[in-house]
Image: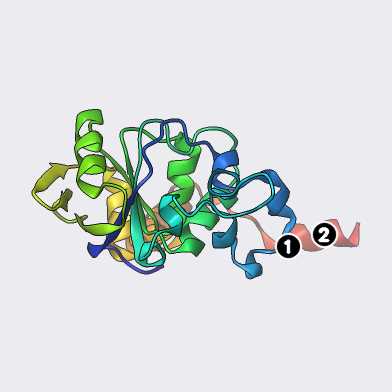
Amino acid sequence: MQPITVLDTQGVALAAANVDTDQLIPARFMKEPRSVGYGQFLLYDVRHDAKGTPDPAFILHRSGANDAEVMVSRRNFGAGSSREAAVYALVDFGFRCVIAPSFGDIFASNAVNNGMLPAVVEEEDAERLLAALGDEPAPIRVDLEAQRIRVAEVEVSFSVSPVWRTKLLNGWDDIDLTRQHADTITRFAADYAQTFPWAAPRPQAFDLIGKG
């Protein structure tokens, strides 16, 4: 995964609470293969009318929105089902960070595993960021090392799990994170084998099972 240190990019405001995973990607689109690009399905029913006509006033249809890598929203973002496709839709659209006062637990975990930062801010700070962004995409800076966000003159702090922060700063997945402890794991395995030699499998035993 691509590491995140500082994002100097465009941000968009989605001033809504309880944006659930079915809004992020309606279930009917999940039969499509990921290779088609799930970004086209992001918030589909929110930004289109019943006939599928795009709402030109919606933030993702504004000029410059395709360059946005950061979305700011309200509390309980990503609640609902555990569908990882909700994260795929955001990532495939181009987002690398979502900022909100709270997230669905599974959504946040899926986000990190796909290289996207779920940055938690206080509710009043979310409102300040939403107001600063306004109705058009606008410049935003997200500094994961310092855990600070800045839009125009508004600057706030955010929180993220230390383990998730380490993974995102380095572009690591769970396997990469485990590999950082390879020496400790090797020492433990050697010590365990010496302390409990009887617990080690014997190849001869498997041979006898096969012959039986």
Give the x, y percent position of residue 212: 91, 56
Instruction: Tell me, for residue 208, which label it has, or none.
Output: 2
Q: Quadrant of residue 160?
A: top left
Pointer 1: what residue?
204
- The percent coordinates of residue 101 (x first, y second) are 31, 33
Q: Position of residue 98 (x, y in %)?
A: 36, 48
* Separation of marks 2 and 1 at Cα, in angstroms: 6 Å
Residue located farthest toward the left when viewing the structure as drawn: 153
Q: Report the side of 134 relative to 2 (left or right).
A: left
* Residue at the (37%, 69%) spot, across then down: 2
| Amino acid type assigned to the residue bearing label 1 in the image | Gln
In the rendering, at what x and y percent does residue 112 appear? 41, 52
Q: Count residues near mark 2 (Cα–Cα under 10 Å), then give few for <14, some for 14-19, many for 20+.
A: few
Q: In the displayed image of the protein, which residue is found farthest to the right?
A: 212
> Residue, x 69% and y 53% (percent of image)?
29
Colouring rule applied to residues: rainbow
Question: Is residue 184 visible in this depiction of the protein?
Answer: no
Q: Which residue is drawn at 36% across and 67% down?
A: 67
46 vs 137: above or below:
above
Tell me, yes or no, whether the two marked residues, 2 and 1, touch with CB atoms within 8 Å.
yes
Q: Tell me the kind of residue under disc 2.
A: Leu
Q: Is mark 1 on a helix, strand or loop?
A: helix
